[in-house]
Image (cartoon, rainbow, N blue to C red):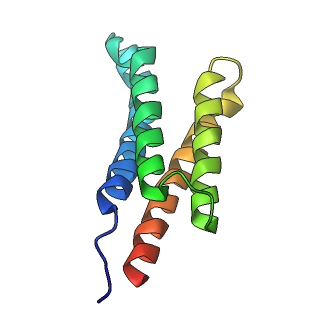
Amino acid sequence: MIQTNKIYWADKLGAISAILCIIHCLAVPTFLAMGIGFLSNPIIAFLFIIVAFFSIYKATNGKFTKGINVFLWVAFIGFVISILLEERAEIFEYGMFLFSTSIIIGHFYNMRSCLKS
């Protein structure tokens, strides 16, 4: 019997969180211009980091054995570096979009590969 009930919830949580992160990053400048500043709180950024770490850890079981696992962890490390250095240069803001998109793609690919096995 093939077991197809792997930890899909972690991949779904990670993909949804990364999508919300992209929406957050795109919407915050607009909200700041309207005078709504609570969304630019650094706690929200750290919340995205914690959710991304937890979902990638659970989806990969903390291992680097497959290529997709390495891809997800590299995307996470790039995401964290981009968030921490966002204030230093504009290039890191674009890095957040790139690495968030990479996390989304990695989670979708991981879900697909889990369905095949």
Q: Quadrant of residue 51?
A: top left
Q: Nearer the viewer, residue 32 or 82?
A: 82
Indicate the quadrant where residue 115 lies.
Answer: bottom left
Residue toward you, 113 or 100: 113
- Measuring from the top left, give residue 113's x and y in whole percent: 46, 76
Q: Is 35 on the left or on the right of 109, as rendered?
A: left
Classify 112 as above or below 98: below
Towards the viewer: 95 or 111: 111
> Which image quadrant: the N terminus?
bottom left
Considering every residue shown, the one lying at the far bottom of the view is: 1
Question: Viewer-proximal residue, 26 or 98?
Answer: 98
Give x and y (percent) for residue 41: 41, 14
Residue at screen point 31% across, 77% down: 4
Placement of the C terminus among the 4 image quadrants? bottom left
Query: Which residue appears at 42% of the width and 45% of the height?
Result: 18
Residue 2 vertical position relative to residue 26 in the rendered view, above or below: below
